Image (tube, rainbow, N blue to C red):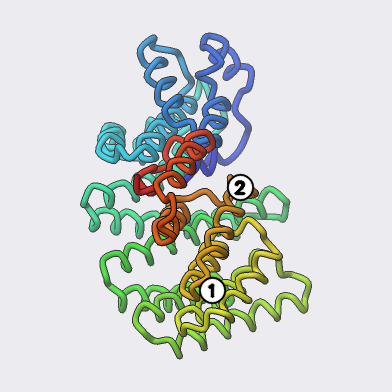
Amino acid sequence: MGIDDSVGDRSNAAVDLNRTASVKKKNAPRFDTRNMQEQARKGSWRLLLENVKEARKIAAVFSPEERMIHTTYHILALAKLGNYTGAAEELAALGDLQNASFFYEDHPNVYPGISGSMVPFSLRWLHAAIPYRIGQASTSMERMYSLLDYCSQKEEKALAADGKSEEIDEIFSSWKRRKEIVNFAIINLHLGQKDYIVALRFVNETLARDPENVELWSKFAHVQLQLGDVDGAKLTFAKVEALVDERAKGGEVDSSLLCLVGRNKGLVAFVEKQYAAAVKAYNEVLEISPGDALAANNKALCLMYSRDLIRATQVLEDVLQKHTEAALNETLVLNLCSMYELAAINSNESKRKLSSWILQVAPDDFDLTCTRL
């Protein structure tokens, strides 16, 4: 994941920009937080790590808020490059995220009149997610539930704020979005532990509070499919489509929800081995969003199972070439390389060419072992 917010939960006046600027002047541009943000956007995780290491080596001077942002990017870069142990050690060195020194009011000379936490949501997320990667699933689960409570409190606080303004609406929407991210993470953690019934119970409880959440209903249907309840999943997917249709009548629907409905239709057809119907559904998605990697990948699989290997490989090659940033992921590349192997004609040469191209365009965290070379 990327850095969701550049700063933490400050609640009133803006940071003294002159004071912050005076700190920045002492440091090279490569240590600037905006530069780090750009490196993260490009997936230049190794360069980001080098800059953090260099900043620490020369003891560059940063404001408390900047130090927090640097630390967050550092931990994120370690995680992106698969060094979860190193990321966990950095998190442990931080200690309690509620430490007084992580609050603006603990630095009145730097942030006069400002209150709240400097800890970005992304750091709280990493704090919850990293333990799972080092075999501590129960710790991750506990922290995710705590993070869910934290998001709920922030959402309720924004909802109860006096008056109406675009800023308050934006804060409320932001915390609602973050809460949904944590909800899905908790569901996936339960599924990863094969706690399917617990996952369904959690989804049901969440839907009781948010009965028109189409993404969550869709996730519910996916869990039903994992349990083999195809008929139940079809009914749930039908509910998703009805909710989206209702929004469309009111002019509130966006293309992402139409794509969600299309992918759901394709998935049901795929599970029932109705590959032609599945391809039709995925084509409708790709007409709306040509770079939809999941739709392209699943369409190719349907074609492969229909014994049309040539068209299957063409679908994946085309989406990679035309929509590289959106479509490039290890699962899609792995499937393409598997198709090259099934074709059995110059498969290694095709995979080598693909690997060379990926090296030129992929972010640092892309796992090239998916090319099966």
Does residue 67 appear in the picture of this structure? no
Mark 2 or mark 1: whose residue is earlier in sequence:
1
Quarter of the image where one finds residue 245: bottom right
- Can you tell which of label 2 and label 1 is closer to the viewer? 2
User: Which residue occupies 55% across, 78% down?
Assistant: 211
Disc 1 marks a residue whose amino acid type is Asp
Say few, some or many: other residues with alpha carbon within 10 Å of mark 2 (under 14 / 14 to 19 / 20 or more).
few
> Can you give x and y, in whole percent of width and height, for residue 338 in the image?
40, 58
Residue lying furthest bottom: 231
Residue that label 2 marks: 321
Say few, some or many: other residues with alpha carbon within 10 Å of mark 1 (under 14 / 14 to 19 / 20 or more).
few
Residue lying furthest front: 345
Disc 2 marks a residue whose amino acid type is Gln
Quarter of the image where one finds residue 122: top left
User: Which residue occupies 49% across, 25% down?
Assistant: 66
At mark 1, the secondary structure is: loop
At mark 2, the secondary structure is: helix
> Can you give x and y, in whole percent of width and height, for residue 299 in the image?
55, 68
Residue lying furthest left: 135
> Can you give x and y, in whole percent of width and height, for residue 361 in the image?
54, 37
> Can you give x and y, in whole percent of width and height, for residue 92 in the image?
26, 36
Left or right of 193 in this view: 145: right
In the image, 276 versus 186, the foreground residue is 276
Q: CB under 8 Å between callouts 2 and 1?
A: no
Q: Quadrant of the C terminus?
A: top left
Instruction: In the rendered structure, find residue 210 and report the number of the disc placed on it.
Output: 1
Q: Is residue 349 above or below residue 261?
A: above
In the image, 266 versus 302, the foreground residue is 302
In the image, 317 versus 161, the foreground residue is 317
User: Which residue occupies 44% across, 33% down?
Assistant: 73
Does residue 157 appear in the picture of this structure? yes
